[in-house]
């Protein structure tokens, strides 16, 4: 079990909940890293007394330094700071909860130190799955997923010694706020509509990705890498209640599922206590009051992002990095209310048509594909 953690992305939804779980479990916090939220980081430093705190933004770092000058915690900034936090010797586990490509280099650095990765940064596996999984193998670093779906699958696979016994993984998907709407109806949807998620309270980027189903597409790609299965053996099913967090179907027809209330605390706690479990202060799922559990096939016509992600996963190379970079840029434009909801998928498709995928052999390939994809999306407005 984890004794000391570093939390990269401590002010986001997962980061804040990770610190709460650390407090509940009595896990020490060696380092925290955030971007600009000085007020919250200052509070976190005072409560958790990490040895190192990183503000990615230089000005935020200077501001924090002056506010906590009476505390022994060291303040660093920029990518160098993130890498120092990721490699800090006293942490045995690094929780990677940063949003976006920025999380990739620190995650690889922590892997190279042989640390347990409690993985909550999607881009890590989506864009650089091959690199990350082979580095983890080489450096004996455990990768324990924090995302609820991958944690569910990870839990269902405990005791499965032969991956050939797995017929397929089934990721559940809430369907987001626009479930049941047609492509034409989606055309009108605004930022405000899309940010209203039925079951999960999350950051803005992932909430939009849940509305387009790109989030499920990213998760299909992640599952393929995490569990070394071809994308054809990873399915997604709409399950509106978010009670079943995902399932594994085995070759003998057995299907295992993990159920729980829609809270990220459980997968976070499990990533820290694995292979053990620790008592939780939260109320468990009450089967008698959770109502009917329903399932439906995703509507890939209305929500093309899932099919786009599957195609990129099958193609390999830097396709997924191109798709991810284009999506991040497009979601940014949607959040700024500069494009419509359906334009997100259109811009991602357009980037995939204009940026040629390349072989993926090093981190630079990923970064270049990402930059070209973003430029392709932004050039639409030039
Ligand atoms: Mg998820």
Image (tube, rainbow, N blue to C red):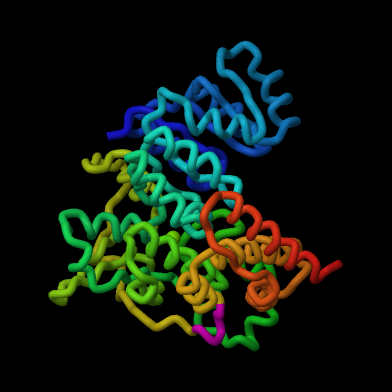
Q: Residue at x 78, y 68 (%)?
A: 338
Question: Which residue: 48% across, 46% down?
Answer: 14
Residue at x 36%, y 75% (from the top left corner): 235
205 lies above or below 112: below
x 60%, y 30%: residue = 81
| Quadrant of the drawing holding the N terminus | top left
Which image quadrant for residue 38? top right
Q: Is residue 189 visible?
A: no
- Residues 312 and 381: in front is 312
Identify which residue, 32 or 234, lies in the foreground: 234
For the magenta stretch, what is the residue range? 300-304
Image spot of residue 166 (x, y percent)? 22, 68
Q: Horizontal and vertical percent for residue 317? A: 52, 65
Could you say which is closer to the camera, residue 41 or residue 90? 90
- Prevailing SS of the magenta stretch: loop
Horizontal and vertical percent for residue 299? 48, 84
- Horizontally, is 107 left or right of 27 in the view? right
């Amino acid at each position: 079990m984890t004794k000391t953690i570093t939390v990269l992305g401590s002010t986001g939804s997962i980061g804040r909940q990770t610190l709460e779980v650390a407090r509940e479990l009595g896990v020490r916090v060696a380092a925290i890293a955030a971007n600009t939220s000085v007020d919250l980081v200052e509070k976190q430093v005072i409560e958790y007394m990490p040895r190192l705190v990183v503000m990615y933004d230089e000005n935020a770092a200077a501001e924090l330094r002056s506010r906590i000058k009476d505390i022994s915690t060291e303040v660093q900034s920029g990518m160098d700071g993130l890498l120092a936090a990721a490699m800090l010797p006293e942490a045995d586990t690094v929780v990677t909860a940063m949003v976006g490509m920025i999380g990739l280099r620190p995650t690889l650095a922590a892997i190279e130190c042989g640390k347990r990765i409690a993985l909550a940064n999607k881009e890590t596996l989506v864009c650089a799955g091959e690199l990350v999984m082979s580095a983890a193998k080489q450096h004996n670093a455990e990768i324990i997923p924090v995302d609820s779906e991958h944690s569910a699958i990870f839990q269902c696979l405990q005791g499965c010694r032969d991956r050939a016994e797995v017929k397929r993984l089934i990721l559940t998907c809430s369907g987001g706020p626009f479930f049941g709407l047609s492509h034409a109806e989606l055309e009108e949807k605004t930022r405000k509509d899309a940010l209203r998620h039925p079951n999960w309270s999350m950051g803005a980027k992932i909430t939009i990705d849940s509305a387009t189903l790109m989030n499920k597409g990213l998760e299909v790609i992640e599952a393929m890498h995490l569990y070394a299965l071809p994308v054809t053996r990873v399915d997604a099913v709409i399950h509106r209640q978010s009670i079943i967090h995902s399932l594994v179907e085995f070759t003998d027809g057995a299907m295992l599922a993990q159920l729980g209330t829609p809270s990220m605390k459980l997968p976070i706690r499990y990533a820290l206590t694995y292979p053990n479990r620790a008592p939780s202060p939260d109320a468990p799922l009450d089967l008698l009051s959770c109502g009917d559990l329903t399932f439906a096939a995703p509507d890939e016509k209305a929500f093309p992002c899932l099919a786009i992600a599957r195609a990129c996963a099958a193609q390999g190379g830097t396709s997924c990095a191109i798709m991810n970079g284009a999506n991040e840029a497009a979601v940014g434009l949607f959040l700024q209310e500069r494009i419509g909801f359906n334009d997100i998928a259109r811009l991602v498709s357009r980037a995939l048509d204009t940026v040629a995928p390349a072989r993926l052999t090093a981190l630079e390939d990923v970064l270049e594909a990402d930059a070209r994809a973003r430029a392709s999306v932004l050039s639409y407005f030039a």
